[in-house]
Every structure is written in C-alpha cells, then in structure tokens.
Amino acid sequence: MSATRVFVARLAGCSVFDPAGDRVGRARDVLVVYRKDESPTVVGLVVEVPGKRRVFLSIGRVTSIGSGQIITTGLINLRRFEQRGGEVRVIAELLGRKVGLRDGSGDAVIEDVAIEEVAPGEWAVGDLFLRRPRTGAAPFGKGATLFASWNQTREKSAKGEAQSAEQLIATYSDLRPADLASTLLDLPEERRLEVAGELPDERLADALEEMPEQEQVELITRLGAERAADVLDQMQPDDAADLIAQLPEDRGEELLDLMQPEEADDVRMLLAYAPDTAGGLMTTEPIIVSADATVAEGLALIRRHELAPALGAAVCVTLPPYEPPTGRFLGVVHFQRMLRYPPHERLGTLLDTSLEPVHASTSAAEVSRTLASYNLVSLPVVDENHRLVGVVTIDDVLDYLLPDDWRSTAADEPEPVSTSTAAIPTRSGSAGSGRRTSHGTRR
C-alpha cells in the first residue's frame, strides 16, 4: 500500500525494489530543493546500491512508498551521486537544524520531516516534527514536541553556529561501522565534522577503521588533540598505529602522549615494526589464557560480543604474564576443538602442536602464504624469546594485500543491479516526460 505522507527518518535504510520484487538498494536520504514561497519540493532519493555506491533516484521514478519499502519503475542510473548546488539532503542537513516559529512562540529543532505526495509522481515537504528546548531545572527529559508547516517556521541558526547532529546520529545508530564510514564520507565536509564531533568515541573509532587512509588522516587532523587521542584509544591498536604512522611525527607523538598509557604502549610497540612484517600487521589484543584454564573459560572469552570473529577463532596459551609480550608461548586451541571436549577439560591438553607461530620480523608475503596453506584465519606472532606479542588475522592480511584505495574503488566499480528495465544514461525527472521540476535536468 502506497502512503501519501511519509516521515523521512523512517525511510532511512528502507529497501528499494524494482517492479519484479528484486531489491536494488536501500534509501539513505531524500533530496529537496527550496522554493521561494512554497515548501521545498522533493527531487529524488539517495540510494545505496551493491558496492556501497550512492546513486540518485528521481522521485518521478518512484511508484510507491509505504510499508517500509519503496517501489521504483526499475530504471536506475548507476552513476555515483553528486549533490548539486541548491539541493539539500533532509537527513544529512535538515535534521537537527534550529528554526524559529513565526507566531513568536519561540525556537525549536527539526527532529523529522514529513514529505507528501501533492500530485502523481510529485512530492513536497509537508509538516515538520519539532522539539522545543527543555525548560525548567530538571536535569533529564526533553522539551515539548509539536508539528508545524514549513511556512510557519524560519531558519534560526546563527552564522558559524554548528548544526546539532543529535537527531542525525540517532538515524545512523543502526548502521554497521563500514556503512557508517561510507555515510560520513558522503556528507558535506562541515556537516561531517559536526557529526564526528557528536559521535561517541567508540562509534567514531569504528567508522575511522573502515575509512581509506587519506580520509582517516583528514578527519583526525580536524579533531582537537584530546578528542583525537580519546578516539585512538578506542581503535584497535594496529589500526591506530597505521593511522598515526600517516601523521607528521610531531603530531603523532603529541597524540601518543595524550592516549591512555596502556593503549599508547601497544601502539608504540607496533610502530617499531616495519609495516610489511608480521609485527606491523598484527593486533596486540588476542585472547590469552594459561594452560590450566578450562574449556568453559575459553568459550566464555570468545563469546564476548565485541570480539572480532577472527580473534575468536582460537585462544592462545602462554606462561605468565598474560599480556603481550607474554611469557613463553605454548600453543593455540581452536574453538572447534573446544566444542568437542567437556567444560572442565584443561586447555593445556588441547594444544594444536602442528601450528608453528611466525616471528615478528616474518614478511607479510610469508604470513599470507602460511594462512592460505593451512586454511587459517589467525596466526600467532612471537619475538626472539618465543614470547607471544600478537596475532595476525586474515582481515589484517587482506587490508595489506588490497590496494590502498580498495574501499573507494570497490564503490566506484559498477555492480549489477537487478531491474526490470535497462538502466538509463541520465538523471532526469518523471519516467515518461523526462521533466525534472524547475531545478533543471541532470546529466
């Protein structure tokens, strides 16, 4: 069933289907253009298709919006989306904007925007869902909400004042780190910084780990030194080391001095190794236990939600101490082997004696061959004293082997999109006439 009034925040992440019922992507934003005496008109959607490519879908090619899905005519242009002058993205740029009410009752912040079908194939901004500032001395709670039409409000943000990103961040809360990174990079630069400024440290760290190096450096250098250090504390040590290695030496030292000593020590250790060695690729946070630990204890450790799957594939057994660099490395126990034994079984009796660790100076090429030869997803790394210093995982190796710009080139390569009709070469308006409102035609 098609709706004639939809709130944009609810469209974020909705599946986009062609007439045959095949999913072609997910909606990520709604694109509008301001008009002089009327509410903004909707010109199209920003849709993410396979390969994380963001493309433009003209509103004239949308036949139905409703029930958590969007149906199109099947005509999709796979050219990467580029925002044009005069266009405004509702989720990225309108949510969180401060407005004043023309009736003089005060200010409010836009929390959501309704779009309405005003004619077949034509949509415009309808009511705004607003929230007034919190009043009173209560430390918790939010201000009152209200609906207002576009013409009942006026923009209130002062020149140079940062737009609140709270509502936008709430919209992005369910995105996976890679999707969040892609979404952040798709925002205008200033808006990206506003959102990064309000994201929790851990969430921003997750996104940074999924960005190309150049974009990582650009973003981290725009953050204040203390905030940047807090974010680096939340990153995986190997990712933090890779990022710091790209910074000027004095900036890198400044951030290391501001980081938590324990985290900084891990990063400094990794920076001491050449980037094309096992030491340069490894992470310093594997699961490490004693030989007396039981199967039940080992399974409890790999069950942690925040643990990367590759790190949970095996536990490392060493002599004390149990922090890298550890006591002498004894071996690993694969999680599948733990599943075959009773909970009280000691892990020291289940060691994989056939798996030899690699030295920290071993070349990345040799590490890759070892992982491939023995069908492994992780490989322990030891120093000259046979102490465990870290683990190289399959994703570490893939990051090394793939081109530096693999994240962006993957999105630039056209992916087959299931549609009922061949893709069209231009970004135009309605499917039949090629009209696209007074804003003009996209090529």
Image (cartoon, rainbow, N blue to C red):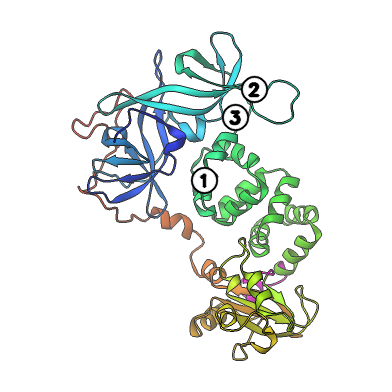
Chief secondary structure of the magenta span? Answer: loop
Q: Which mark is residue 312?
A: none
Mark 1 or mark 3, which is nearer to you?
Answer: 3
Ranked by sequence position, the earlier of labels 1 and 3 is 3
x and y percent of residue 408 in the render? 46, 54
Ranked by sequence position, the earlier of labels 1 and 2 is 2
Question: How far apart are labels 1 and 2 at the CA level?
Answer: 30 Å
- Residue under circle 1? 185
Start-end of magenta stretch: 271-285
Q: Secondary structure at mark 1?
A: helix
- Residue under circle 3? 163
- Residue under circle 2? 133
Question: How far apart are labels 2 and 3 at the CA level?
Answer: 15 Å
x and y percent of residue 200 in the render? 65, 45
Q: Is residue 291 above or below residue 276?
A: below
Where the C terminus falls, by quadrant? top left
Specify the amino acid type for callout 3. Gln
Q: Is residue 320 above or below residue 435?
A: below
Relative side of 392 to 294, left or right: left
Residue beneath the point at 51% across and 40% down: 187
Estimate how packed mark 1 is, as few (under 14), some (14 to 19) or many (20 or more) residues with alpha carbons within 10 Å: some
View extreme (top): residue: 103
Asked if disc 2 and disc 3 are in contact, CB closer than 8 Å, the reply is no
x and y percent of residue 87 in the render? 42, 29
* Camera sees residue 243: yes
Q: Secondary structure at mark 2?
A: loop
Question: How far apart are labels 1 and 3 at the CA level?
Answer: 17 Å
